[in-house]
Amino acid sequence: MNRVDVAIAVPPRTLLLDVAGPAEAFRLADAHLAAQGRPERFRLRFVGPQAQAASSVGLQVAGLESLPTRFEVPTWLMVVGQPAAALGRPDAATLETIDWLRRDIGPLMASGDDHRLVGVCTGTLLLARAGLLGGRRCTTHHAFIEMLRRLAPAAQVVDNRVFVLDGALATSAGVTAGIDLALHLIALACGDALAARVAKDLVVYLRRTPNDPELSPLLAHRHHIHPALHRAQDAVCERPGDDWTLASLAEAAHVTTRHLLRLFAEHAAVSPMTYVEKIRLERARQALSGGASVTRAAQHAGFASDLQLRRAWGRHLEGTPRTARTPSQPGCQSGTRVVTRAR
């Protein structure tokens, strides 16, 4: 895995949680990677137009690097938000930040290198003022959606979303949504199981953007903070091809089989083996979308045969595994939609 710089741009009067929330998520992700003997993935950097800046609550954020004019390694630039008073009257340092975004960051993002631009909360408004949104999909705090539409009339502004991804651009809604977005980016880079561990550390729900047509089975049934159940779910996500039984799941969770059944019923609202089946289906769907044959996808996901995959598909999804191999449009799988069936 390549190391990524997470550069957080801190303008004056910044919302402190916009900085601390995502930064803590990335720090915890590295801590978990190190504990597993894996290389750390994220290097946090804090940059700004001044060496220190007063936050929205008065605390001084010091030791800021100068605003960079180039990136030496793949970089995720996170532009964080400011309170309403600061947005209405940008001060000189904020205007300098906007000029820097327009002058230096715009060309870097257009270079085709492996960089990502992230707007946290009202940080998206600074991206809009810098002309970096174009006609792309984006969002911001619900109170400033109309301002975003005025500042970026060509952009596809999406309201009522936790966060929105459009290629290398990622934007989030209100302040805590920056944590949701960070968790999603961690999942993309390091896997869903690791992101779930970080969410558990932060004592937050792990959720994807409501913009997604369906909730990924890799993230569904995890709106809880029970450590034993997370242990079982982590094990399945990491090794879906293992020969999972109720007994082996209970062993992974360090509980009895009877207690595991109660935990799944109370906190996940699904049976243990149905959970395993859904995770395997998602792994198979991902393999199919990458061009794998039905046989190869079944093997990759841990199904004993093509027939077992097709039967599981019929229980939870529409269409067939074969139709899922033919995308109807970029990013969508033809004939694949999660079905809620009466039990």
Image: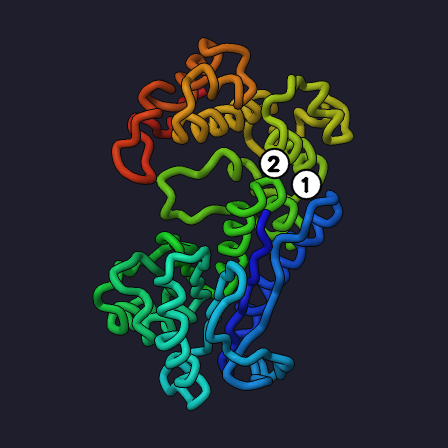
Image quadrant where one finds the C terminus: top left
User: Looking at the image, is 203 positioned above or below residue 286?
Assistant: below
In the picture of the structure, the residue carrying the numbered disc 1 is: 226
Amino acid at dot 2:
His
Image position, residue 187 (x, y; %): 54, 46
The residue depicted at 42 percent of the width and 49 percent of the height is 209
Nearer to the camera, 1 or 89: 1
Looking at the image, residue 28 sits to the left or right of residue 282; the answer is right
**Residue 153 found in image quarter:** bottom left
Amino acid at dot 1:
His
Find out whether the residues at labels 1 and 2 contact each other: C-beta distance under 8 Å: yes
Q: Which mark is residue 162?
A: none
The residue depicted at 47 percent of the width and 21 percent of the height is 297
Image position, residue 54 (x, y; %): 57, 85
Image position, residue 253 (x, y; %): 73, 31
Image position, residue 8 (x, y; %): 53, 69
Q: Which mark is residue 267?
A: 2
Nearer to the camera, 258 or 309: 309
The residue depicted at 53 percent of the width and 23 percent of the height is 301
Callout 2 environment at 10 Å: few (<14), some (14 to 19), or many (20+)? Answer: some
